[in-house]
Amino acid sequence: MTTEPFDISSWPPSLTPIQLEALTLYATTYALSHGLLYLLPGPQPAIPSAAIHAPFSLFPSPFPRKLFETGKRIQRTYNVLYARIAMDEEFLDRVMGTKTGVGKVDDFIGQLWTGWKQLRDEGLAQHLHLGLFRSDYLLHALSNQPLSIKQVEFNTISVSFACLSQRISELHRYLLSSTQYYNCSPQLKPENLPPNRTISGLAEGLAVGHKAYNVQGSRILFVVQPGERNVFDQRWLEYELLEQHSILIIRQTFEELAHSAIVDPHTYILRVSCSTDIHPSGSIEISTVYYRAGYMPNEYPTPAHYATRFLLERSKAIKCPTIALQLAGGKKVQEVLAQPGVLERFLRDEKRYGKDGIFSEHEVNELRSTFMAMWGLDVGEDLLTADYDSISSGKEGFGLLKARNDAHALVLKPQREGGGNNVYKEAIPAFLNSLPPQERQAWIAMELIIPPEGTGNYLIRAGTIQAESQAAVKADVVSELGIFGYALFGGESREVKEKEVGWLVRTKGKDSDEGGVATGFSVLDSLLLVDS
Ligand code: ADP
Ligand code: MG
């Protein structure tokens, strides 16, 4: 054992071709046996009969132990921060609404906000919100400075890969215990592979919502996308809810819910109708609506789809997330949080949150230290107040000029989730030329995080043809850490019931700007904690 700081760029250790092939066979067989799976690409039959393993890395990826601890620690603060944002209607109206906010120029955000506003005006039947969160980070490596973690984004809807993350951690641990990875690295030992209990953590979050609703016989509704390939990640959560909490779930798409969901006009109870062959009463009361769908505009092709979303929102079932919490997860909110004083408004204001509800300056600064520079394309020179006059006159504001000048070191992001929406570096100037001035407000500019160079791994992707053999491909990679948390809040008390509940690593080829396992850019990975 060496006490020298570990050099991340020395990864992965070398293997002989025979060792590599043996590990690949152990790994893929374990993945197939333990449900580290995806459905096959292409149209999904109603009852699937085949699956392939999800893409994964052969080795866990090295990550500084201290920075992993930091990410877990600040998750508690993030849980409370986003809960408070979701409860701050005035703030969300201003930043995301259709009068002054992003909703003015972004139709999707505008539709969600307008529906939410209408429901608020009618009076909400359920004041509790449930959030399952994932805060994503990359390592940031500036020359002559210690490594740090920087936040990519904070997700408040449909956070995925919690369950498959646990399975890939278990896979790496299995490779270690079955082969010791052929003693190729002294770093590879059990105490450097942190435990991953993310499945039970997320299931606990949903169970906390279900128990707060507190009606015998009610179930959790999983709202899912048609043609979803990542179903096993969702099924593991379903099995955990049943086995550990005796909670049943029901899965439906928006299309199905358009016909099956009924909200009682007096009690606001949400019921999903079903055949009496399945359930004797012909309908099931829903305690909690858990969205694994509904975060992209193309999921709402008609007004009827929005109507279904608002119907569920109107009910007294607990929503994970509420529209408010979904809006809080917008990239515009992330950018506004980086403006001076905004974190203090949510975390240090004793008048609002009481003596016991405020965080120390150190806690706030530790959280802020994970921010990259961000600004709105529509901001004026002081970088604080949106310069609406210059937007409407089409004049170029400071935010836009700065984005042009610094393009090589930036990414531009719209208010979208799910990957593939951002504009990077060289593509920025031409993109800005084509962006109608009134749409600038929907975009933020963010400084690029600079991950450490030279780290590699072996990536294993399943072939889709049966006869095809699998090979591990060595690549230079970048790893993105996600930390999960849940929060239940709202209603009478100011209290936020929250917890940090696990982690995920996704690793992508270095030359890909985007991450995203589902979109094919990256693979599932786990952590090798190192002292660096
Ligand atoms: P999405 O909501 O589509 O997941 P993200 O903000 O997570 O959008 O961006 C997608 C991917 O782009 C990230 O997973 C990361 O790989 C890359 N990325 C995003 N922001 C940055 C940044 N500031 N620096 C470097 N890479 C980034
Ligand atoms: Mg992301």
Image: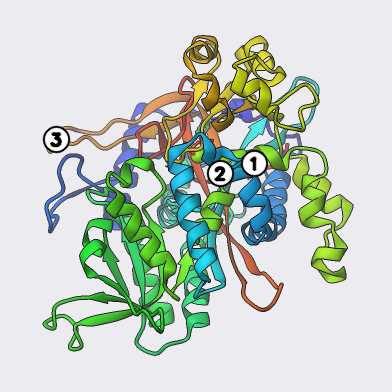
Question: Residue 328 location in percent, x, y?
Answer: 59, 51
Element on which disc 2 rests: loop
Element on which disc 3 rests: loop
Element on which disc 1 rests: helix
Between discs 1 and 3, the one toward the N terminus: 1
Q: Look at the numbered discs 1 and 3 and tell me whether their residues touch, using CB distance below 8 Å.
A: no
Looking at the image, is mark 1 or mark 3 nearer the viewer? 1
Q: Work out whether 82 lies above or below 365.
A: below
Looking at the image, is mark 2 or mark 3 nearer the viewer? 2
* Amino acid identity at mark 1: Gln
Residue 464, quarter of the rendered image: top left
Between discs 2 and 3, the one toward the N terminus: 2
- Circle 1 residues within 10 Å: few <14, some 14–19, many ≥20: some
* Amino acid identity at mark 3: Ile
Query: Where residue 330 is drawn, which disc sits there?
Result: 2
- Circle 2 residues within 10 Å: few <14, some 14–19, many ≥20: many
Q: Which residue is mark 3?
A: 465
Question: Residue 89 location in percent, x, y?
Answer: 64, 57
Q: Nearer the viewer, residue 245 or 22?
A: 245
| Label 1, label 3: how far apart the Cα atoms are | 42 Å
Report the quarter where the N terminus lies. top right
- Circle 3 residues within 10 Å: few <14, some 14–19, many ≥20: few
Residue found 87% across the figure and 63% down from its top: 350
Q: Work out whether 166 lies above or below 523.
A: below
Q: Which residue is mark 1?
A: 334
Q: Work out whether 230 lies above or below 256.
A: above
Numbered circles on residues, count: 3
Compared across the picture, whether 52 is left or right of 203 comes to left
